[in-house]
Image (cartoon, rainbow, N blue to C red):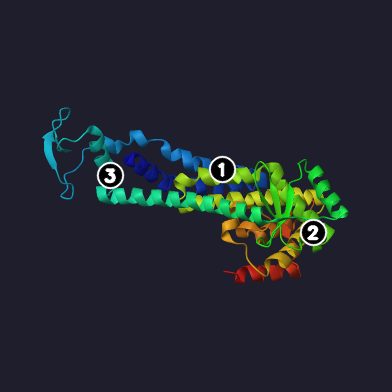
């Protein structure tokens, strides 16, 4: 089992960066829609987990003779029946042990170093699982200690109208002092957590927040996010895995932004609401790390990029140009304030 895991790590070590770079270059060249980008990054994550399995039992190092080295005790030379050449073997060693030593030697590691590397990587995988579990328990605790939200008749109509337009069953609305912004949690019985005094915002801002969170619910993003994080645990020790997960999170938020902006019939109007909500909700404090399991309106530190994408406008500079030129609108004052705050925060 140790041999299999070491070979899996050796394959993943070079395959995951190669997959991530290939996906990035492809998206850079084609510049497809954000939905296509999201799908491609999910495929890259799936290949990052599955592709290193291929070739574990067919490594050429298993068939190569193991050179005699002073740090491998218990070796003696014996002629090979097929080639007649002397190849070192272990006293009373099984073929599996010989293959294991050959692979370890092929990777340039001593058996002790290989064992330590396997233990360290498995400890990182276990730590990742514990972190997911603690995040889930933290969000669960927040939901248990939250209070039911009391809506006026107009606010209730607004919320149910957003749910009707997105074709989802309205989740339970609850208030909590421990969340900095709207946050969706739960699979079977979803809960939309709202900060205290959330309904002091304007009707347009409430619509933007509700549409974004309900878009997550319509796409089953909470369940998918949990599955992606669990599925990536075997390669969670690789830095490139976290880069791929970040791209998945970023494109997921952009998809929900597009859905919400389409419901509001204005990308710029939705972007202004997003900035206004961020300025009022996030300036006093930052989102706690343990709440990353839930899907928040301002999660994963992608607000600036999301707003810049929403404020892209397309204008042709000539009737003879086949492809229009994309430019960005000048950032508004709330956006500059939000940018300075995000850059100043640790």
For label 3, count other residues whose C-alpha is less than 10 Å away and answer few (under 14), some (14-19) or many (20+).
many
Q: Give the numbered dot on residue 330.
A: none
Which label's residue is closer to the chain start, 3 or 2? Answer: 3
- Secondary structure category for the residue under label 2: helix
Which label's residue is closer to the chain start, 2 or 1? Answer: 2
Front of the two marks 1 and 3: 1
For label 2, count other residues whose C-alpha is less than 10 Å away and answer few (under 14), some (14-19) or many (20+).
many
Q: Position of residue 48 (x, y in %)?
A: 48, 43
Q: Nearer the viewer, residue 3 or 52?
A: 3
Q: In which quarter of the image is residue 335?
A: bottom right
The single residue placed furthest to the right in the displayed view is 154
Residue 322 visible in this rendered orientation of the protein: no
**What residue is rendered at 42% in x and 52% in y?**
124
Q: Is residue 42 left or right of residue 260?
A: left
- Would you name the residue on which mark 2 appears? 205
- Would you name the residue on which mark 3 appears? 104
**What residue is rendered at 84% in x and 58% in y?**
203
- Would you name the residue on which mark 1 appears? 227
Tag 2–tag 1 contact (CB < 8 Å)? no
- Secondary structure category for the residue under label 3: helix
Front of the two marks 3 and 2: 2
């Amino acid at each position: 089992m140790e041999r299999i895991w070491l070979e899996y790590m050796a394959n993943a070590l070079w395959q995951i960066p190669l997959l991530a770079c290939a996906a990035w270059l492809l998206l850079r060249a084609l510049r497809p829609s954000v939905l296509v980008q999201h799908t491609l990054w999910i495929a890259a994550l799936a290949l990052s987990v599955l592709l290193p399995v291929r070739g574990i039992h067919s490594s050429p190092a298993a068939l190569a003779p193991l050179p005699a080295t002073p740090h491998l005790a218990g070796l003696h030379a014996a002629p090979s029946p097929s080639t007649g050449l002397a190849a070192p073997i272990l006293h009373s060693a099984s073929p599996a042990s010989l293959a294991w030593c050959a692979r370890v030697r092929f990777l340039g590691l001593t058996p002790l170093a290989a064992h330590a590397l396997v233990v360290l990587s498995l400890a990182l995988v276990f730590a990742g699982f514990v972190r997911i579990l603690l995040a889930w328990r933290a969000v669960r605790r927040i939901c248990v200690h939250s209070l039911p939200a009391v809506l006026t008749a107009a606010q209730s109509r607004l919320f149910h109208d957003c749910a009707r337009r997105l074709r989802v069953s309205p989740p339970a609305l609850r208030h909590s002092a421990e969340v900095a912004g709207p946050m969706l949690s739960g699979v079977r019985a979803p809960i939309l957590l709202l900060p205290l005094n959330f309904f002091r915002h304007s009707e347009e801002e409430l619509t933007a927040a509700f549409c974004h969170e309900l878009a997550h619910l319509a796409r089953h993003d909470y369940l998918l996010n949990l599955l992606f994080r669990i599925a990536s645990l075997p390669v969670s020790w690789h830095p490139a895995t976290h880069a791929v997960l970040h791209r998945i999170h970023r494109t997921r938020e952009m998809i929900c932004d597009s859905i919400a902006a389409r419901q509001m019939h204005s990308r710029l109007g939705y972007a202004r609401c997003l900035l206004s909500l961020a300025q009022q909700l996030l300036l006093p404090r930052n989102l706690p790390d343990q709440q990353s399991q839930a899907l928040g309106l301002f999660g994963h530190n992608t607000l600036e990029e999301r707003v810049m994408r929403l404020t892209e406008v397309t204008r042709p500079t000539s009737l003879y140009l086949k492809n229009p030129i994309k430019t960005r609108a000048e950032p508004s004052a709330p956006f500059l304030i939000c940018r300075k705050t995000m850059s100043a925060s640790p």
